[in-house]
Structures are given as C-alpha cells and as structure tokens.
Image (cartoon, rainbow, N blue to C red):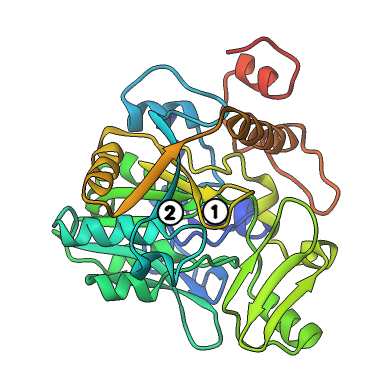
Amino acid sequence: MEELKKGSQDLKREVMDGGWCVSCGVCVEACPYIKALGDRVAVIHDCRLDDGNCYKICPRTETDYHTLSKMVHQKDEYEPVLGGHRKLYFARAAQEKFSEPAQYGGVVTALAALALSENEVDAALLTGNSPGNRPQPVLARKEEEVVAAAGSKYTVCPTVKGLYKTNDDDRVLVVGRPCQVTGLRKLQHRTEMRQGKNVELIIGLFCFFSLRYDFYDFLQDELGIDAVCGMDIPKDGDVRVLSPSGKHEVPLDKIRPLIKQGCHSCFDPTSELSDISVGSTESDPGWCTLIVRTEKGDALVQKAIAQKVIEVQPYPAEKEKQLREAVVNKKRRVLLEQHDFAPINSSYLNMDEKMRQFLKGRGENV
C-alpha cells in the first residue's frame, strides 16, 4: 500500500467528523491525543505531526484487502467473496461450561480458553460487559475470565485499545469485529509498532452492523429493560431481546436508526483477514459457522477437535451458497453506495478495477 503522509487531524477530518468511525479502538492509545468515551472516539488535543500511524492503521482510511490478504495468507490469490480460507464447518463447543454462557455454540469461548490453557497465548483480548451492560475491553489471562466475557455483544466497543495495556512480551489472542481485524492487520503492517507484534492469533466475528450505545437507552425507554442477557438479530423479522424479566421483540425498523453510521460502509462482514472466523448459521442457534483461514488458525481448531473441546460437522453446500449471497450483497451495496437508511462511503477501498466490477455484478469472475 502506498505511504500517505497524514496524521490525527486528517483522521479527525476524514473519518471522525464524517461519521465513518466504527469505534474499533485501534487508534486509541496509539496516540496520546486520541481517547474513547463509551462508544465514541475523538482527538482531544491538536497534534502537530503531519505523518502519524493513527491514520495509517484506521480501517476506514485507505485499505487494500488484496495486499493485506497476501500478508495474512502468503498467497497472491484473493478470494473476493469470503476471503482466503482452508476449511468451512458447522461447529459448537463440546463442553457445557463453554456453551452454556455463550451464544451460537460457544466456539469462540472454547477456542480462546484452549489457547490460554495450552500456553499458545498469554492473554485473550475480549469484549466483556461493564455495569449497565455497556461493553468494555477485557484482557483475560485465565479460563474463568474468558467464560465471564462470553456472549455476543451487539453494540460497538473500542476493544482494540486494550492491546496497548499488554506487556511487551505478551502473546495475545484477539477476538474482534471485522473492522477491528482489519485495523489489527494494518497495525501489524506497521512493523515499527510493538503492539502488532504482540498479536499472536485473531478470531474474527461475523458482523453486518453494530449498534450505538444509546441502544440501551432505547431499550429502557421502549421496553423498560435495564439489563440484557442476550439478543438475536435474525436475517428477517423482529429483533429478539432476552432480559431478566423475559423475552421481548422489537421491530427491526426501530433498531436501524441506532446502527453505527460507519457500519453501513463495511466491506467485510466475515472478518476475512482473521485466522479463524465465527458467525451465526442463521438456522440453528446451537451451532455456529466456523471458517478456518490460516495455518495458525487450523492448528488451534484441529487441537480443539482432537481434545474434544469443540465438535464439527461438514458445512452444507446450500448454506455456503446462502452465506456467499449475503456477503456479495453486502459488498455490492457498499461499492454501489446504495443505501436506504444512512450514507455509505466506499472511497477508502483500494481495489483492482476488475474485482470491483465483478463484485458490482458487472464483470467476469475473478
């Protein structure tokens, strides 16, 4: 990727002021003048540097997925729909201690706990809950800390800022949204930054959008809910919310205005730059979709299977077709900047024109 001489003021003007920030947290603490308050990230003081890493590592500044994919997979080929991958499974945690507190099978919790127990990593950077259900970064070093952070979080959280609190020699497994995975790979591309070297393994989550923190205020006002135990956002239909008082349904149309604006411009809903990707099957809540992408990711998954930490099944061809269609439709909306609810900005995508036309549905296969 071509070097750009831009710094925090450019980041503020091009990303934050335009509403494109996705609160991934990768720039927070990378610069002492960038801070996060709740789900908002801001430049709090003027920085005189005209060339800063904060700009270069942002997932909403110029991003070349092909180049980053080559760095991750050590291959020139780029799979433009699902990204590079080796295996595709239905999977679930085989032990109740991981599946019970988790959502969609508990595979992420099980894999993170296994990596810690097998000394594959020193810590796992996760998204946990603070009082009031507001997500917050958690640096887990014990299995019980991993389990305590289990469960899907549907609001944004600048989790990656927790990476700057790690020790110099920590090997860290990071679980994050696709934007956070992209930011981490761009961070690793900056070889002078210590935190990129700390990232040992990345488990990426499927994510088609995340909600702002005021979603919790909405639940309080609309349903009288002040604590959320779980939530499910189906492909179609009402959003289902589980609280201590029971199950509730909210029309998706009421939720859409609470989607973080920058999420509408996301090109990568399956975390294609991760070592392992995990998401819903859209059919069976007891299982998840597991995409094994790298040699390092495959080693952890095979160890988990061998030790009966997780169990897997072949991924049905019809489900893969549905997944590919959903991903292509998302990418196409971004490239065509088609929107019904919020503006879309695809200018950050540095992409070969042949691939761009293919994903728009106007060119040949690539």
Please state if 266 lies on the left or on the right of 361 as rendered: left
Image quarter (top left, top right, bottom left or bottom right) of the C terminus: top right
Q: Position of residue 36 (x, y in %)?
A: 49, 72
Q: Nearer the viewer, residue 106 or 337?
A: 106
The quarter of the displayed image where residue 164 is located: bottom left
Secondary structure of the residue carrying tag 2 is: helix
Residue 165 lies left or right of residue 352; in this view the side is left
The picture places residue 5, in percent across and down from the top left corner, at: 45, 41
Up/down of 245 relative to 253, above or below: below
* Residue beneath disc 2: 54
Tell me the tag on residue 343. none
Q: Sort mark 1 into few (<14), some (14-19) or many (20+) by Cα contacts within 10 Å.
A: many
Which residue is at a point 51% across and 47% down the rendered structure image? Answer: 59
The front one of 53 and 276 is 276
Q: Amino acid at mark 2?
A: Cys
* The label number, if any, that marks residue 11 in the structure image: 1
Question: What residue type is disc 1 on?
Answer: Leu
Residue at 15% across / 56% down in the picture? Answer: 118
Identify which residue is drawn at 27% across, 33% down. 295
In the image, residue 247 above or below residue 277: below
Instruction: Give the spatial CA distance, label 1 vs label 2.
Output: 8 Å
Left or right: residue 253 versus residue 189 is right
